[in-house]
Image (tube, grey):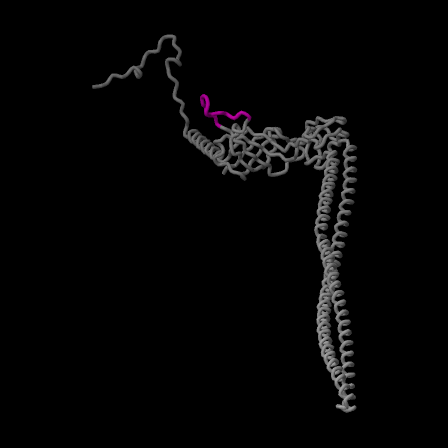
């Protein structure tokens, strides 16, 4: 059975007065084969270029939240004083060591002269203490040697005296023995003389009775005279032995006195030796005086160095090359240590780029960087990543966020990355801290 055509396919009559565009639909747009191929090629090239650009951008990270930083040195005096001269102006270029400000040096020159005078006095005291120490050492050494020699000599004399005493004692003993022998011989001679005298008396009586001959009497008389002579000789020998004993006793007494005198001399010499042995204590005392003088000398030298340093501080020099900024000092001002006189913007410049934390996944120190400075868009500068801060910038702010309190809204944090220039910056470009830059880091 044949299906009836739908409403969309039934030909309706065109109303009278209706425009043809409303009654007849436009013919479909048809492209010829060449244009279709050209469109396909353009779309393919565009897709390929988009893909290449996408993959190219995956190897780079960039941010416009980046600024130039630099070494800014606050110039301030180290001593108080009145400004004598100011030799620079704002924005002036200065070199390292160039004189910037000069303070009035009169008071500090006087302090240097006083320190020099104190140093001269300390040197004189040091030399005097050194000479005293050398003299004490020499005198002590000589006295010690002399005292030791005196002790040895006194001991030798004492030994000699003791030997003489022993000899005198032996002489006394020998004299006493000789005296005893002489007395024994005299006693024997006396007994013999008494016997001879008695015999003579008997023989004389017998001779008177003619009982003995004259010859016998003469012999007895001769024997009596010999006995008497022997007695006399024995008596003289006794006297001589007594005299010798007296001499020996006197010599013994003298030897005893000599020994006592020698022993006293030894004691005196030993006392002087002890005094001389106390010399090292005097040497130590002089050494202590020298050490004190040395310390005073070092203090005087340090005081002179301090005074000279303070005099040198009256001239304030540029520590590095750079440009003067924020000058706030004029001649005649009175300044104090630590007071800011001006700022020195050094030539040490670098870039601090605050990358999002999601951009740090492949970023490493040492990666190359292309830097564009907003003030000089026609220039490109080479740099490299030096370091990445260990923490976000918000964490080191004056009032870090307290995420543990209140409602929490997650915010992508930014982390400062330090980028240094690879090449020296051109001198004719006025590049300084705070200027905006756009760094592009090649991360792969």
As rendered, which of 206 and 41 lies closer to the eye?
206
Horizontal arrangement in the rendering, residue 440 relative to residue 312 (left or right): left
Q: Residue furthest top?
A: 16
Q: Is residue 390 shown above or below 26?
A: below
Where does residue 128 sit, x and y in percent of width and height? 77, 47
Q: Is residue 118 shown above or below 268?
A: above
As rendered, which of 207 and 85 lies closer to the eye?
207
Q: Residue at x 76, y 79 (%)?
A: 231
Residue numbers of the magenta segment: 398-412
As rendered, which of 193 and 398 lies closer to the eye?
193
Q: Is residue 57 magenta?
A: no
Where does residue 273 sit, x and y in percent of width and height? 72, 56
Q: Is residue 400 shown above or below 273?
A: above
Horizontal arrangement in the rendering, residue 413 relative to residue 119 (left or right): left
Quadrant of the rendered image containing residue 271? bottom right
Q: Residue furthest front?
A: 209
Where does residue 278 sit, x and y in percent of width and height? 71, 52
Q: Main secondary structure of the magenta part?
A: loop
């Amino acid at each position: 059975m044949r299906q009836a055509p739908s409403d969309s396919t039934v030909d309706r009559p065109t109303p009278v007065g209706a425009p043809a565009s409303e009654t007849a639909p436009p013919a479909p747009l048809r492209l010829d084969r060449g244009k279709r191929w050209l469109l396909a090629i353009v779309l393919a090239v565009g897709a390929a270029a988009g893909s290449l650009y996408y993959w190219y951008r995956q190897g780079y990270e960039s941010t416009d939240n980046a600024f130039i930083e630099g070494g800014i040195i606050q110039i301030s005096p180290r001593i108080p004083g009145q400004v004598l001269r100011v030799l620079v102006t704002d924005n002036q270029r200065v070199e390292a060591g160039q004189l910037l400000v000069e303070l009035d040096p009169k008071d500090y020159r006087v302090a240097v002269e006083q320190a020099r005078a104190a140093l001269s006095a300390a040197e004189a005291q040091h030399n005097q203490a050194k000479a005293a120490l050398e003299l004490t050492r020499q005198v002590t050494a000589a006295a010690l040697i002399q005292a030791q020699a005196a002790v040895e000599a006194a001991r030798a004399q004492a030994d000699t005296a003791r030997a003489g005493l022993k000899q005198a004692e032996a002489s006394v003993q020998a004299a006493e023995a000789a005296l005893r022998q002489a007395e024994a011989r005299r006693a024997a001679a006396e007994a013999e003389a008494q016997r001879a005298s008695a015999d003579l008396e008997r023989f004389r009586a017998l001779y008177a009775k003619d009982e003995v001959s004259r010859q016998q009497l003469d012999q007895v008389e001769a024997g009596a005279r010999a006995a008497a002579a022997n007695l006399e000789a024995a008596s003289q020998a006794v006297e001589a032995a007594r005299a010798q004993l007296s001499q020996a006793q006197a010599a013994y007494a003298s030897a005893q006195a000599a020994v006592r005198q020698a022993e006293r001399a030894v004691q005196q010499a030993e006392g002087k030796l002890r005094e001389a042995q106390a010399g090292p204590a005097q040497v130590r005392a002089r050494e202590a005086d020298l050490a004190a003088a040395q310390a005073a000398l070092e203090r005087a030298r340090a005081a002179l160095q301090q005074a000279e340093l303070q005099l040198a501080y009256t001239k304030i020099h540029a520590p590095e090359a750079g440009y003067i900024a924020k000058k706030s000092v004029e001649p005649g001002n009175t300044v104090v240590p630590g007071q800011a006189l001006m700022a020195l913007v050094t030539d040490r410049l670098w870039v601090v780029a605050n990358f999002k934390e999601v951009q740090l996944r492949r970023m490493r120190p040492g990666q190359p960087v292309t830097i564009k400075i907003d003030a000089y868009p026609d220039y490109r500068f080479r740099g490299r990543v030096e370091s990445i801060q260990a923490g976000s910038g918000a964490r080191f702010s004056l009032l870090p966020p307290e995420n543990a309190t209140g409602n929490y809204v997650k915010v992508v944090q930014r982390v400062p990355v330090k980028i240094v220039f690879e090449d020296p910056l051109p001198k004719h470009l006025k590049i300084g801290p705070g200027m905006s830059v756009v760094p592009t880091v090649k991360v792969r």
